[in-house]
């Protein structure tokens, strides 16, 4: 019997309840560090060891736990029991990137509101949308008794086949950092600790538990790590989850460079680092490199490193007592900072309001990729007939798979779709587009074909005024795709429908870019990724023009695999797992910067997206001293809508442009306003690895307004002072 089990007799309930008197750390007027210090001073060594590891619920996604879990666990990804004697509440951890997850239905019958996929939020280019989404999830988590959310996924999209891109925020560090930072701030506004994950450069799922990622320091600081840096500054997450992979030879969770040197020293990060589930490989090395809490060790790691092995290491002096105290301090400090000791009241969930948040996210982030002859918005008042085809649109909207999967109210609308084991089953949230489209056009005859028979679908499309074809491609944690094609002969389906009806609209439900051999034959294409709660209504609102699409792609959309830095993804199709992956091929030039460097044109560029109105831009004015851009924007069309002002900069000596700032603005028809766009200083700088800091070269910088990373206005040249 381990010592932890001796302690378990002292476990209190999951919630510490009201603070007993005589606990000076319960004074909310003190700062989190002071409160943590007062509390640490009272803790026994066993209590300290209790705080630095979490338990897992039992039968989980990857392998079943053989050991009983201490009482008080609500049932989700992780649990650190309360220490009732000192009023330390339990840590109840749930996955929550896209809503409070219940991926293995560990809490039978418990449902939550699913947000759309992460790229939708990023495609809104609106941190407020992200904040509201985070706050919605945080509030639902609190109502269920969780106080730590495994949220904040921000791995950059280097690999368009990555099965987890649907949990993340695209390819650009500035956009991802600002959006994910806002999501985290939203979660934590509900007095919940949020993580940011997976730190770092865990940009593919293939061989994720073993692969050694090669990426040089300068490139890393200017790309993947910059995204984390910006999001941590903005969101102040209580915890950072280190990732599965190795980085330049060391596991991410025992990587001194990542954890000690960058995160804790350079960025002065005060919170704690928790390992990903199965991501810890040692006691001494990990702890001395900066890992503070071992997650779900008994179920996922080779052994519980943060119990007996660490106790021995502390006793022998291999790990200093001061370091153990620092681990404890960091955990407690984050708990105080997020309000876990002070704010324990539960508020009821407002389902309708939460669904509206999810729908608003979709309406702000769906991207209109094509709209020939203004086929959209549909003239609903005059629409007589509509053929709806494919992708279970009569039942619901697709969700991505793995630990982030939310169980929406009403359950899985299409049960039984393989893979049935984790990361499956495939889940459809029960917000059927068909019903919403019928509601949108009450006078029209709206018919449905499931798309399995191409001829039937084409015949239905032929009889209708407009055909709306839904296509899907499932993506899931732990597996990457080997290609960008649509599965299940959906290309043939779209081609046949488009041939039968020139007014064909394609709705994409997917985690990643897909090839579209039929693109030139269809009238319109709307990218919804995985649409989330009330997704059917959101789609109908976008098609009818009740909402004007304003999303812009948060990643470059390749024409085919040959355009990528690594056309092959070894191991994705099975066979021998690759030992390493070379990200130095593109280095910091992830996504659009790679396309610019190579002079190749993607199918759709980063930042691209159409609207039902048009916007005219004035001349860009740059104040380099104030780090601000100003430009007037006018809505010259007939409909209200939102524009995204994108400012790109080309630093002297660099062949590529970087996004330096952005702002979203909503304008009525004819309205004109001047927008102030904050510019990110690190986008004007390079990371100097000898001086360990950002250095501005100075000289003539070319700033351009862009409709996308590819469609740029003439540059404005501005003299920028070098760093001192
Ligand atoms: C995933 C994490 C997740 C954890 C707990 C891991 O497999 O990589 O994102 O938070 O499981 O479910």
Image (tube, grey):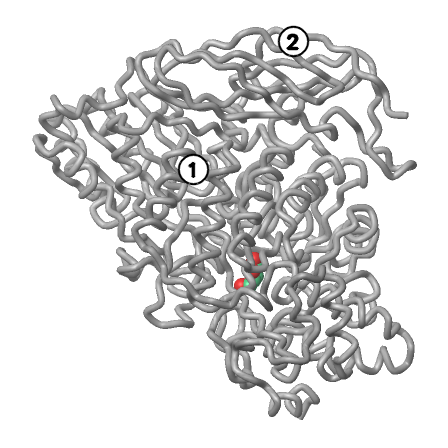
* Residue depicted at 70% across the width and 37% down the height: 223
Disc 1 crowd, CA 10 A, few/some/many (<14, 14-19, 20+): some
**Residue 310 coordinates in the image, percent (x, y):** 79, 77
Circle on res. 715? 2
Question: Which residue is at a point 25% across and 35% down the rendered structure image?
Answer: 540
Question: Mark 1 and mark 2: span between their CA atoms?
Answer: 37 Å
Q: Is residue 623 visible?
A: yes
Indicate yes or no: mark 2 CB to ligand 1 under 8 Å.
Answer: no
Q: Nearer the viewer, residue 399 or 380?
A: 380
> Which residue is depicted at the point 61% across and 45% down?
155
Q: Is there any visible trace of residue 603 in the rendered image?
A: no
Image position, residue 406 (x, y; %): 40, 58
Which residue is label 1 attached to? 485
Q: Looking at the figure, which quarter contains the N terminus?
A: bottom right
Q: In this picture, is 613 found above or below 580?
A: above
**Nearest to the observer: residue 159 or residue 349:** 349
> In terms of sequence position, does the residue under pointer 1 or pointer 2 come before the other?
1
Q: Position of residue 467 (x, y in %)?
A: 20, 29
Residue 336 against residue 171 in the figure, above or below: below
């Amino acid at each position: 019997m381990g010592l932890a089990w001796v302690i378990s007799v002292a476990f209190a309930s999951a919630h510490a309840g009201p603070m007993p008197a005589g606990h000076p750390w319960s004074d909310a007027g003190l700062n989190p560090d002071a409160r943590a210090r007062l509390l640490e001073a009272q803790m026994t060594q066993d209590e300290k060891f209790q705080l630095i590891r979490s338990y897992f619920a039992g039968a989980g996604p990857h392998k079943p736990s053989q050991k009983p879990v201490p009482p008080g666990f609500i049932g989700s990804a992780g649990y650190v029991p309360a220490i009732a004697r000192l009023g330390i509440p339990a840590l109840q951890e749930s996955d929550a990137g896209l809503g409070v997850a219940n991926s293995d239905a560990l809490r039978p019958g418990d449902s939550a509101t699913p947000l759309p996929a992460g790229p939708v939020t990023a495609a809104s280019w609106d941190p407020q949308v992200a904040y509201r989404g985070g706050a919605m999830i945080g509030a639902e988590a609190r109502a269920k008794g969780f106080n730590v959310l495994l949220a904040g996924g921000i791995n950059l999209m280097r690999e368009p086949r990555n099965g987890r891109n649907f949990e993340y925020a695209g390819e650009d560090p500035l956009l991802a950092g600002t959006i994910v930072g806002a999501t985290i701030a939203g979660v934590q506004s509900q007095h919940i600790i949020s993580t940011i994950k997976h730190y770092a450069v865990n940009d593919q799922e293939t061989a994720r538990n073993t692969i050694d990622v090669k990426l040089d320091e300068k490139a890393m600081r200017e790309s993947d790590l910059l995204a984390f840096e910006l999001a941590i500054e903005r969101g102040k997450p209580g915890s950072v989850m280190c990732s599965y992979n190795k980085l330049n030879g060391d596991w991410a969770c025992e990587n001194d460079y990542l954890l000690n040197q960058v995160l804790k020293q350079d960025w002065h990060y005060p919170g704690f680092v928790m390992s990903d589930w199965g991501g810890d490989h040692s006691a001494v090395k990990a702890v001395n490199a900066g890992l503070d809490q071992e997650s779900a060790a008994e179920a996922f790691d080779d052994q519980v490193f943060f119990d007996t092995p660490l106790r021995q290491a502390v006793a022998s002096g291999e790990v200093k007592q001061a370091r153990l105290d620092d681990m404890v301090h960091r955990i407690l400090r984050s708990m105080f900072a997020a309000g876990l000791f002070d704010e324990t009241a539960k508020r009821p969930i407002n389902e309708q309001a939460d669904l509206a948040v999810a729908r608003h996210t979709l309406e702000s982030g769906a991207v209109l990729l094509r709209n020939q002859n203004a086929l959209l918005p549909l003239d609903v008042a005059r629409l007589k007939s509509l053929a709806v085809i494919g992708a279970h649109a009569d039942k619901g909207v697709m969700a991505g798979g793995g630990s982030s999967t939310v169980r929406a109210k009403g359950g899985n609308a299409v049960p039984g779709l393989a893979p049935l084991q984790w990361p499956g089953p495939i889940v459809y949230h029960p917000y059927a587009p068909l019903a919403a489209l019928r509601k949108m056009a009450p006078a029209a005859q709206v018919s449905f074909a499931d798309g399995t028979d191409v001829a039937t679908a084409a015949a239905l499309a032929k009889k209708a005024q407009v055909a709306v074809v839904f296509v899907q491609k499932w993506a899931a944690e732990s597996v990457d795709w080997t290609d960008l094609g649509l599965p299940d002969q959906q290309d043939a389906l779209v081609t046949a429908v488009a041939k039968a009806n020139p007014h064909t609209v394609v709705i994409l439900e997917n985690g990643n870019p897909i090839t579209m051999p039929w693109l030139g034959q269809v009238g319109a294409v709307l990218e919804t990724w995985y649409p989330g709660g009330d997704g059917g209504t959101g789609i109908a609102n976008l098609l009818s023009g009740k909402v004007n699409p304003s999303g812009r792609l948060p990643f470059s959309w390749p024409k085919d695999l040959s355009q990528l830095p690594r056309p092959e993804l070894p191991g994705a199709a099975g066979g021998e797992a690759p030992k390493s992956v070379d990200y130095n091929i593109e280095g910091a030039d992830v996504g659009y910067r790679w396309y610019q460097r190579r002079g190749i044109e993607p199918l759709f560029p980063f930042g691209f997206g159409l609207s039902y109105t048009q916007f005219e831009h004035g001349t860009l004015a740059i104040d380099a001293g104030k780090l601000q851009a100003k430009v007037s924007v006018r809505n010259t069309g007939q409909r209200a809508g939102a524009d995204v002002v994108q400012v790109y900069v080309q630093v002297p000596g660099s062949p590529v442009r970087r996004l330096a700032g952005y702002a979203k603005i909503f304008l009525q028809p004819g309205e004109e306003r001047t927008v102030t766009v904050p510019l990110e200083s690190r986008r004007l700088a390079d990371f100097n690895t000898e001086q360990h800091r950002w250095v501005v070269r100075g000289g003539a910088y070319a700033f351009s307004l862009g409709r996308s990373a590819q469609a740029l206005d003439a540059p404005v040249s501005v003299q920028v002072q070098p760093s001192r």
